[in-house]
Image: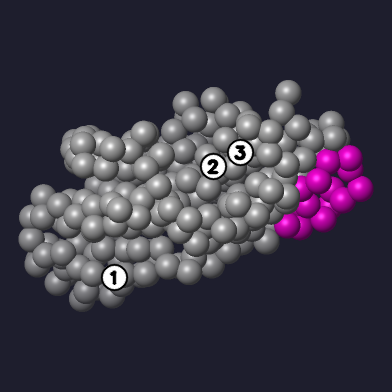
Amino acid sequence: MATIKIFSDSTCDLPKSLIEQYDIGIVPLYVTFGDQDFRDGVDIDPRKLYEMVDATGKLPKTAAPSPGDFASAFEPYVKEGRDIIYIGLSSHLSSTIQNAGIAAQMLEGEPGKITVIDSLNLATGVGQQVLRAARLAESGQEAAAIEAHIVEMRKYIETEFIIDTLDYLYKGGRCSGLQNIIGTLLRIRPVIKVLDGKMTPTNRVRGKRDKAVEQLLNNALSLKDQMDNDTIFVTHSFSDEDAQFVQHKLKELTGAKHVYISYTGCVISSHCGTNTIGIVFAKKF
């Protein structure tokens, strides 16, 4: 049994096969419709989420796991004397990191130590760091060395995605009604990057979706020489055909060892909507 247990939350969007392979613990965030609370990836999946949005015309609220949720997840392992490294959703976007830190304080005095790392990212931008940490733990690295590596690595994560519809940004209060109407009429798709732990619009692509997907791919390929070619993620929400196309092109043009397709969970989907697609990779450091 490995002495270090890697944890993340449900926004890391790692494929189930990788979560199982590396025995990664996942603490779910919450999705709330009215008075109903659902655990992301446990009680609700994106398909059900979109069905409920279509039926109600409203977006759900999302919430971080409570300190108690984290403590319940962590406690069995630290009581065994195992160290825990938790890597979670950016502190600029959620209180998950804060609540995990409170849980760590609650469990001080147990044999195992808990390390909380702010990914300063979202979706597989978190997942990239979690996967690296899991591989380092499997190779026998100590917790302090893994923490130092991930804190350095997070500066080199490139997370960029294209939102296909402004409806979810509008319903979530992230753009005005006028912007939504104009954007729909002109087929404007925002290009979003994660910068300093925040979602930042960097560009807008006007016209057919193919053009937007091509822009996303070209943006990634412009950094090809700087890529760490071990692992690239193509992350999407019900955009299977485009994701497979982008995966094929990245394999062909980068020579990456692994190009995984991952699916956005309910929390990320509730902010971005269907047909969102992104590319996430680490640069060499």
Establish if 47 lies above or below 177. above
Residue 109 in magenta?
yes
Other-residue count near label 3 (Cα within 10 Å), few / some / many at <14 / 14–19 / ≥20 = some
Q: Which residue is mark 3?
A: 136
Which residue lies at the image location 57% right of the left edge and 35% below the top edge? 135
- Whichever of callouts 1 and 3 sits on the residue coming sooner in the sequence is 3
Query: In the displayed image of the protein, which residue is found farthest to the right?
Result: 109
Residue 132, disc: 2
Q: Quadrant of residue 118?
A: bottom right
Residue 202, disc: 1
- The reply to whether residue 146 is visible in this rendering is yes
Q: Quadrant of residue 181?
A: bottom left
Amino acid type shown at disc 3: Leu
- At which x and y percent is residue 62? 51, 55
**Contact check, label 2 and label 3, Cβ < 8 Å:** yes
Which residue lies at the image location 29% right of the left edge and 57% below the top edge? 223
- At which x and y percent is residue 160? 33, 57
What is the span of residues highlighted in magenta in the rendered image?
A: 101-114
| Structural distance between the alpha carbons of marks 1 and 2 | 27 Å
